[in-house]
Image (cartoon, rainbow, N blue to C red):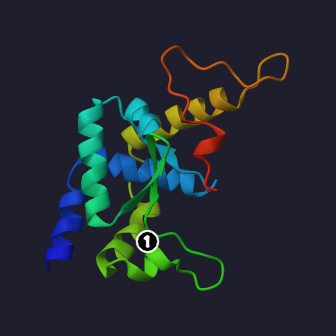
Amino acid sequence: MRELVNVMKALSDPGRVKVLKMLEAREGCACEMCACEIIGLLGLAQPTVSRHLKVLVDAGLIQGRKVGSWVHYRLAAGPDSASGLDSASRRASPYVRAMLAALPAWLEDDPEIKTLRRAMRRAMRRAALPGADGSPPPRPAGAPDCCGPAAANP
């Protein structure tokens, strides 16, 4: 019962559900999201987002991977081509698997999720636009250099 309660508690906050929906949107391009990207898109304070990410990791819904001084996140249970389940999916609790399987159908018409997805698309377009000379796009002032090509899964 403890596992179910932990998963349900993790899903009880709108900010954490938004994080899951952002990571779900990135699954299609096989990209992770850096914590700094999540902070920027949610518009919440860094300690608040860090706490949300810890709750989601502890519940088994997401996984983090350290890249230098940053952490990149992805959904914990992603299918592979052969078995339909990766090793994390096989280890995940049945509650995590069920919730993540249902995630794509949740809140697709919600105005906040639509706004978040538009903001993600704008950020991805800005990051992908090269300079006039073909150089990488300039980083906004104060933006960390953790995001971009390195944020993709290896």
Location of residue 64 with respect to 87 vertically, above or below:
above
Residue found 24% across the figure and 35% down from its top: 47
- Closer to the camera in the image, 95 or 87: 87
Q: Residue at x 38, y 48 (%)?
A: 19
Image quarter (top left, top right, bottom left or bottom right) of the N terminus? bottom left
**Residue 112 falls in which quadrant of the image?**
top left
Nearest the viewer among 88 and 107 is: 88
Residue 39 in the image: above or below residue 10: above
Image coordinates of residue 32 in percent, x first then y, are 53, 50
Image quadrant in which the C terminus is located: bottom right
Q: Residue furthest right?
A: 133
- Disc 1 target residue: 101
Residue 23 position in % (x across, y down): 47, 52
Disc 1 marks a residue whose amino acid type is Ala
Count numbered badges in the picture.
1
The residue at 61%/57% (across/down) is 28
Residue sticking out furthest to the front: 68
- Given residues 126 and 109, the one toward you in this image is 126
**Residue 33 to residue 64: above or below:** above
* Residue 89 position in % (x across, y down): 45, 77
Circle 1 sits in a helix, a strand or a loop, which is it? helix
